[in-house]
Image (cartoon, grey):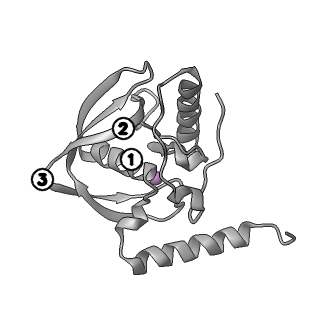
């Protein structure tokens, strides 16, 4: 396995729509494993392939709080097939929007259909934090970040800070 570099906003690759995979083959399982390692190392509870510069509809997630509670989910071509009428609000963050957090309102529960690591079609229902993480990660596949759910004022403030942080971190000579 390998740890992959994570892109941060406003990288244009984070705004692109990812393409469906044909099938989950050994190379794609390798990508899922690398994404899991990257996510655990960050640490984070979800990661989408576009965040590591791969424009494929693949996400990994795990809301386990400790190593013992780990229960990784790997999804290719995930699709939300049902959402609840009622909403939940969570304070969200993102490995591609480091050090910024904001309240986002999303449906409380979802049902998602996807291809698992064995290329089998699965469907699960999730609510609470897991439902929020699934929706957050699936957004990434359509080039949507959690800050896109905020007002333009808040979003632009965060993007300005991220751009400045990146400029400050960059070497002087370019
Ligand atoms: Ni994210």
Q: Which residue is mark 3?
A: 85
Q: Which residue is mark 2?
A: 78
Q: Is mark 1 within 8 Å of ligand 1?
A: no
Q: Sequence order check: which comes first, mark 1 or mark 2?
A: 2
Residue projecting furthest to the right: 173
Q: Are marks 3 and 1 in contact (CB under 8 Å)?
A: no
Q: Which residue is mark 1?
A: 138
Q: CA distance from mark 3 to mark 1?
A: 19 Å
Where residue 82 appears, as percent x and y from the top left, is 19, 43
Residue drawn at the location 36% of the way across and 76% of the way down: 151
Residue drawn at the location 53% of the way across and 72% of the way down: 159
Residue 141 visible at all: yes
Residue 64 visible at all: no
Where residue 90 appears, as percent x and y from the top left, is 30, 57
Residue 170 left/right relative to 83 = right
Is 173 situated above or below 127?
A: below
Task: Say which of 128 and 35 sits in front.
Answer: 35
Circle number at residue 155? none
State which quarter of the image contains the C terminus.
Answer: bottom right
Q: Sequence order check: which comes first, mark 3 or mark 1?
A: 3
Q: Sequence order check: which comes first, mark 3 or mark 2?
A: 2
Q: Are marks 1 and 2 in contact (CB under 8 Å)?
A: yes
Looking at the rendered structure, the secondary structure element under dot 3 is loop
Looking at the rendered structure, the secondary structure element under dot 2 is strand
State which quarter of the image contains the N terminus.
Answer: top right
């Amino acid at each position: 396995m390998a740890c992959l570099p994570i892109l941060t906003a406003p990288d244009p690759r984070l705004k692109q729509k990812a393409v469906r995979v044909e099938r989950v083959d050994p190379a794609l399982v390798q990508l899922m494993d690398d994404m899991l390692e990257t996510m655990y190392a960050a640490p984070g509870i979800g990661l989408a392939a576009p965040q590591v510069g791969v424009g494929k509809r693949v996400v990994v997630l795990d809301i386990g709080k400790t190593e013992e509670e780990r229960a990784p989910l790997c999804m290719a071509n995930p699709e939300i097939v049902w959402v609840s009428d009622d909403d939940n609000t969570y304070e969200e963050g993102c490995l591609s929007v480091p050090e910024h957090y904001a309240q986002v309102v999303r449906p409380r529960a979802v049902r998602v259909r996807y291809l698992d690591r064995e290329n089998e079609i699965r469907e699960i229902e999730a609510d609470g934090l897991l439902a929020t993480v699934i929706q957050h990660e699936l957004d990434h596949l359509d080039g949507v970040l959690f800050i896109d759910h905020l007002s333009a004022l808040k979003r632009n403030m965060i993007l300005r800070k991220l751009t400045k942080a990146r400029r400050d971190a960059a070497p002087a000579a370019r």
